[in-house]
């Protein structure tokens, strides 16, 4: 595949990419600075083509948020409610089953579960949520509770994070989602999510999960106060953990959403930043198989573009996404399988319906 660069300073990075050499932080910073965005895209596309060819993966999944009551005070969150606040809720088993039953179809492969850090219910509540779903929907994978939630469960239960994960696995946990990572620097976390797990704690939760046999997901929430260097530090910390465990399946850059759907363009990440960040993720995270373009945050048309900027996954049907939509996401809260297939095919790619672990269900 020929790569035509308009910035001669990218030639050194191109040589590394062609020969499979790991990029440095300095390389990453230049990729953020170069005016040759299409050159960066070509480099990322070549890496993805080597790993995945024209295959683009998606899953039929359902998003569930069992509670929005949360002790944390993350400055970017519009989802949380304090105990007793208007709109606060905590689903019991009956409400959970009613919610799922109204939205279920037999093609759903995965429950994606994230909620608030609710101190009003004990750890047993979170275990029961998994047990209930496993009992009534045994064919669906349970992807539940972020690394930050694992640290929270450790605090409220008195168990170590390993003990928490062992109990969750006994209950039926299959994998961890990638949320709660935000930006993995303490400078960022002190300002944006001071009440949640530290950088080291989030990474430790996933490393323990990998050691216990779980394969997990990783995210990065970009587009607020973080520097370009902090984005790269975040990627490098994930890359180092992946070197040790090979436990991450996919990396998902998440564009920060503003507080309101009426927010101006100045309050949103730009299309250029979204595409560049996806491409740089593909180039820096050489030991990850997949980079996911999250259509909920960047929209379906940019998601199509992302398929030539290094992305090999577009997530899934979701059914009803709430967290991004509680702030300023402009997209629909769900999408059909046929729409996902159309999105991929009209980008001249091959749609692959997968399960949580990237086993092929069907090629379209």
Image: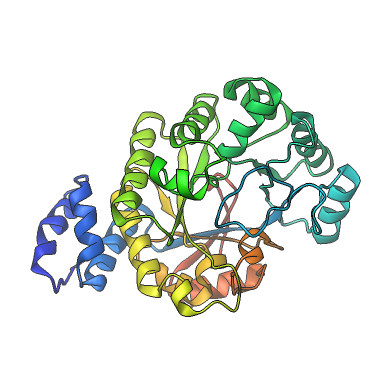
Q: Residue at x 33, y 49 (%)?
A: 230
Q: Position of residue 317 (x, y in %)?
A: 65, 63
Is 118 in front, or is 139?
Answer: 118
Q: Position of residue 199 (x, y in %)?
A: 44, 37
Q: Is residue 154 above or below residue 48?
A: above
Q: Is residue 208 above or below residue 142?
A: above
Q: Is residue 29 above or below residue 114?
A: below
Q: Is residue 94 left or right of residue 210?
A: right
- Which quadrant would the N terminus be assigned to in this image? bottom left
Residue 319 lies in quadrant: bottom right
Q: Position of residue 250 (x, y in %)?
A: 46, 48
Q: How many marks overall? A: 0
The answer to whether one can see residue 317 in this image is yes
Q: Residue at x 60, y 20 (%)?
A: 160
Is 192 in front, or is 20?
Answer: 192
Q: Position of residue 236 (x, y in %)?
A: 32, 42
The answer to whether one can see residue 307 in this image is no
Q: Is residue 308 above or below residue 313?
A: below
Q: Is residue 208 left or right of residue 104?
A: left
- Which quadrant would the C terminus be assigned to in this image? bottom right
């Amino acid at each position: 595949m020929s790569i035509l660069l308009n910035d001669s300073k990218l030639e050194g990075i191109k040589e590394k990419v062609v020969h499979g050499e790991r990029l440095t932080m300095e390389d990453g910073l230049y990729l953020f600075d170069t005016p040759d965005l299409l050159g960066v895209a070509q480099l990322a596309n070549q890496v993805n083509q080597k790993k995945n060819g024209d295959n683009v993966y998606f899953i039929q999944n359902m998003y569930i948020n069992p509670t929005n009551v949360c002790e944390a005070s993350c400055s970017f969150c519009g989802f949380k409610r304090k105990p007793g606040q208007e709109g606060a809720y905590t689903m019991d088993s009956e409400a959970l089953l009613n919610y799922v039953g109204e939205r279920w179809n037999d093609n759903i492969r995965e429950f994606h579960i994230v909620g608030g850090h609710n101190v009003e219910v004990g750890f047993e509540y979170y275990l029961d949520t998994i047990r209930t779903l496993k009992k009534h929907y045994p064919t669906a994978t349970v992807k539940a509770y972020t690394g930050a939630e694992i640290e929270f469960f450790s605090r409220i239960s008195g168990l170590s994070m390993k003990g928490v994960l062992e109990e969750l696995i006994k209950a039926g946990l299959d994998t961890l989602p990638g949320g709660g990572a935000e930006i993995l620097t303490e400078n960022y976390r002190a300002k944006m999510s001071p009440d949640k797990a530290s950088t080291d704690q989030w990474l430790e939760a996933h490393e323990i999960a990998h050691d216990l046999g779980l394969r997990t997901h990783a995210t990065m929430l970009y587009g607020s106060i973080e520097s370009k260097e902090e984005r790269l530090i975040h990627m490098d910390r994930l890359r180092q953990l992946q070197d040790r465990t090979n436990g991450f399946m996919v990396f998902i850059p998440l564009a920060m959403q503003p507080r309101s759907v009426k927010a101006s363009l100045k309050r949103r990440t730009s299309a250029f930043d979204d595409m560049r960040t996806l491409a740089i993720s593909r180039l820096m995270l050489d030991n990850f198989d997949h980079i996911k373009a999250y259509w909920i945050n960047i929209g379906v048309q940019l998601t199509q573009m992302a398929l030539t900027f290094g992305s090999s996954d577009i997530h899934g049907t979701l059914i009803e996404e709430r967290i991004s939509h509680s702030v300023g996401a402009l997209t629909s809260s769900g999408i059909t399988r046929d729409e996902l297939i159309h999105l991929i095919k009209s980008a001249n790619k091959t749609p692959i319906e997968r399960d949580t672990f990237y086993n092929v269900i069907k090629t379209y």
